[in-house]
Image: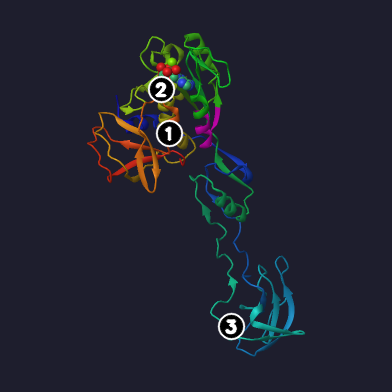
Amino acid sequence: MIPVAEALDRIFALLTPLPAETVPLRAACGRVLARDAVARRDQPPFDASVMDGYAVSDPEPLTGTVLRVVGEAAAGHALDRTIGPGEAARIFTGAPLPQGAVRVIIQENTAREGDLVRILTDPVEDRFVRPAGGDFRRGDRLLSGRRLSPSDLVLLASMNLPTVDVTRRPVVAILTTGDELVPPGAEPDADQIVASNGVGLAALAESLGARARLLPIVADRMDALEQAFALCEGADLVVSSGGASVGDHDLLGSDLSALGVERAFYRVAMRPGKPLFAGTLRGVPMIGLPGNPVSSMVCGYIFMCPALRMLQGLPSVHAPRLQAVLAADLPANGPREHYMRARLADGKIAACDRQDSSLQRVLADADALLVRPPHDPPCPAGSVVAYVPLHQH
Ligand code: AMP
Ligand code: MG
């Protein structure tokens, strides 16, 4: 058995970030920026009025000043004329400040009299001008290696970039094994189980930007496994669930070198999830998850998610851990790192009462995995503990 951190590092060693592709902005949300995006213009591209009012050339016109209105500037309609002393231009929000103008007197502080305008207050500090390039300059960059948010798209669009280069989406082939499994919605015999891991793992992978190829359930027979492996061709990552233990029917736990599986490690010192392995299937990185639904999903969060992030060009880091105060005492932990289903409430964390790795309802009710280090002594309520959040990864 190897520690969780070492297992994940060995998985990272199997992976290479995927190449880039160019996509339109509308398809870029959630994708990882593969190359710096470079602004193609200044923003704003000109000194712009922030308010509706009058643009004037005098930096400090006093109360009572009367100016002649010589033209109008509106958004998208620049005034092609210079404003001189004694002159003003009617101006609206977003309009380019005319040549010669240095500030805007807001409409509320003026009185319009025909083609004259009278200023009703002494100047305030704010000139109501948004300077050219105040947001960003041509050549400014949004750096690669970030997952693009809706706000990032706003910035990229205003940089006048209709497309961006993002890392290709990883294709994850997911295969679930077990003679007892039938798909959801089938009419299971009395000794059959409804397969639940595949949909969960596929959804988890897709929530991280991958494309999931959920393969049909694989029977516990070598020929069935071989057929399923053939369907994994072209994937960037293969994730299997089940059959990873040492039972007679646990084919994935057996030597599969004849089918092209090379193992990098087998067995991790964690709970749940001990019989996990990783390696390659005909050169494609592969993670073999245990079959118990909770083990499968916990290992999905702890191993598959960081792997998918790395494939997309994000830093190869372990699942992010946060800290919270423990709501109730916990007994000492054993020799394996324990990922306990837990709930967060009122800023505190409480481990769920039942931790058996088959209990799917407890997993559905949990919003965090409370992490107990190996041999952790008893933890009294009030201690600070680490957890992995389940719904923001
Ligand atoms: P295994 O690792 O194949 O020995 O499976 C461990 C336990 O998890 C067994 O009780 C299986 O029936 C169950 N199991 C395995 N795969 C799945 C699955 N895809 N969905 C639901 N339960 C599963
Ligand atoms: Mg099985």
Mark 1 Cα shell of 10 Å, populated few (<14), some (14-19), many (≥20) = many
Q: Which residue type does callout 2 highlight?
A: Pro
Q: Which residue type does callout 1 highlight?
A: Tyr
Q: In which quarter of the image is ligand 1?
A: top left
Residue 260 position (above or below residue 355): above
Residue 176 lies, in percent from the top left, at 49, 20
Per the image, label 1 sits on a secondary structure element best described as: helix
Residue 2 position (above or below residue 149): above
Relative placement, left or right, of 287 versus 136 is left
Residue at the spot of label 3: 59
Q: Which residue type does callout 3 highlight?
A: Pro
Residue drawn at (55%, 35%), measured in percent from left and top?
169
Q: Which sits earlier in the primary sequence, circle 1 or circle 3? A: 3
Q: Which sits earlier in the primary sequence, circle 3 or circle 2? A: 3
The tag on residue 301 is: 1
Residue at the spot of label 2: 290
Spot the residue most to the left: 377
